């Protein structure tokens, strides 16, 4: 997949005959996102044009939230890999800054969709708004499409039960530890991926060696102790127990993902792993002494094994 943040000769070459485009943050790639992407890829293949996702970095919600941004469900790399796996050919990701926040709907269409991407077909969700003061909507896009020769397709949201699938709903489910609801909205277990880094070996000293992964997020959508499954270390999917938090018993301050993989003792520093969160066991706690912590770790491991075996 071709990643680009500004128009280049290579981008112009790839979209010289046109493109099929969708626009959005695509954080989490939940069931609603998957429906949109499947339409983009299908239409692009039928027209023999590249399938394009246009997003922004940071996301508009992050930009306007300032120091209190919403938790990212996916790191940028995770999003890139998921879009490539979905069949997207071009990931166009301009910088969202003050100038972009003030862009008018007409300029947005002409500068980004027509000039940069040579759009021939646009696929959007039923809640899509864009440009300054959110003035751009489906009616404006359809009028622009008639004038500038591109078609517009609006895809209805997906509901699970009586709830609309959205990244916001998934964040709320994860923050409250409702992993089953998050799984239903995502269509899979919630996942974090990253490279295993060297830590202080505190877990090994306590009899629970851990694979440590930096979150690389301003805010994590999950905190606490979880039953997890780990992949990326060969063909097997491995069971484990994980902590996402600051390790208050040891006066930690930086949030970290620590994974104890059951019945596993290999050197995996530098390896990239995928951690799927199956169930939340409890909140992170500060213990009065190390022995009390170790006893709780025994109970957490037993509970995680039982859940994962079910």
Image: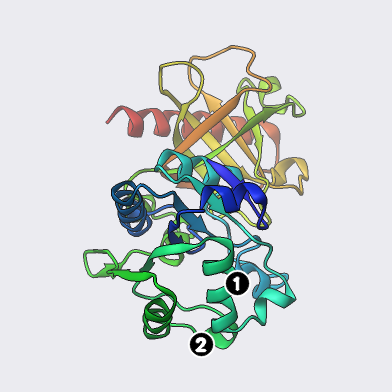
Q: Nearer the viewer, residue 294 or 278?
A: 278
289 left or right, relative to 140 = right
On the image, which quarter does residue 148 sit in? bottom left
Q: Is residue 28 visible?
A: no
Asked if residue 260 is positioned above or below residue 56 in the image, the reply reads above
Q: Position of residue 172 (x, y in %)?
A: 45, 64
Q: Is residue 9 above or below residue 70?
A: above
Q: Position of residue 45 (x, y in %)?
A: 32, 46
Q: Which mark is residue 297?
A: none
For the residue carrying disc 1, how many other residues have a C-alpha within 10 Å: few (<14), some (14-19), or many (20+)? Answer: some
In percent of width and height, residue 5 lies at 66, 55
Number of the label disc, if any, that sits on residue 111: 1
Q: Nearer the viewer, residue 194 or 44?
A: 44
Circle 2 residue? 135
Quadrant where the C terminus is found in the figure = top left
* Residue at image location 37% in from the left, 85% down from the top: 139
Question: Front-most of 171 and 85?
Answer: 85
Residue at 34% from the left image edge and 74% from the top image edge = 126
Residue in the image at 62% along x and 20% along y: 207
Q: Is residue 232 above or below residue 213?
A: above
- Residue 210 at x, y = what percent? 62, 26
Residue furthest toward the top?
266
Determine the image quadrant of residue 258. top right
Which badge, 2 or 1, comes first in the chain's sequence? 1
Q: Secondary structure at mark 2?
A: loop
């Amino acid at each position: 997949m071709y990643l680009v943040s500004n128009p280049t000769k290579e981008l112009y070459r790839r979209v010289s005959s046109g493109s099929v485009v969708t626009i959005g943050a695509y954080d989490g790639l939940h069931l609603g996102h998957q429906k949109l992407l499947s339409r983009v890829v299908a239409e692009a293949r039928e027209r023999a044009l590249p399938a394009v996702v246009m997003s922004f970095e940071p996301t508009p919600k992050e930009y306007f939230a300032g120091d209190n941004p919403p938790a990212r469900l996916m790191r940028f790399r995770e999003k890139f890999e998921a879009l490539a796996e979905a069949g997207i050919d071009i990931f166009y990701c301009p910088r969202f800054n003050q100038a972009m926040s003030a862009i008018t709907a007409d300029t947005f269409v002409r500068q980004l969709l027509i000039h940069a991407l040579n759009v021939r077909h646009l696929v959007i969700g039923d809640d899509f708004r864009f440009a300054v003061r959110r003035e751009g909507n489906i009616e404006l896009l359809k009028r622009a499409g008639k004038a500038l020769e591109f078609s517009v397709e609006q895809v209805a949201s997906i509901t699970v039960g009586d709830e609309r699938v959205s990244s916001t709903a998934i964040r709320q489910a994860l923050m409250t530890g409702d992993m089953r609801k998050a799984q239903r909205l995502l269509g899979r277990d919630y996942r974090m991926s990253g490279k295993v880094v060297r830590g202080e070996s505190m877990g090994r000293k306590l009899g629970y060696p851990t694979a440590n992964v930096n979150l690389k997020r301003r805010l994590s959508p999950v905190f606490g102790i979880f039953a997890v499954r780990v992949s990326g270390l060969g063909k097997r999917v491995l069971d484990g127990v994980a902590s996402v938090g600051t390790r208050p018993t040891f006066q930690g301050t930086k949030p970290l993902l620590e994974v104890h993989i059951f019945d596993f003792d290999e050197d995996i520093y530098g390896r990239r792993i995928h951690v799927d969160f199956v169930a939340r066991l409890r909140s992170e706690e500060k213990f009065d002494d190390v022995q009390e912590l170790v006893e709780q770790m025994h109970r957490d491991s037993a509970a995680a094994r039982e859940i994962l075996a079910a």
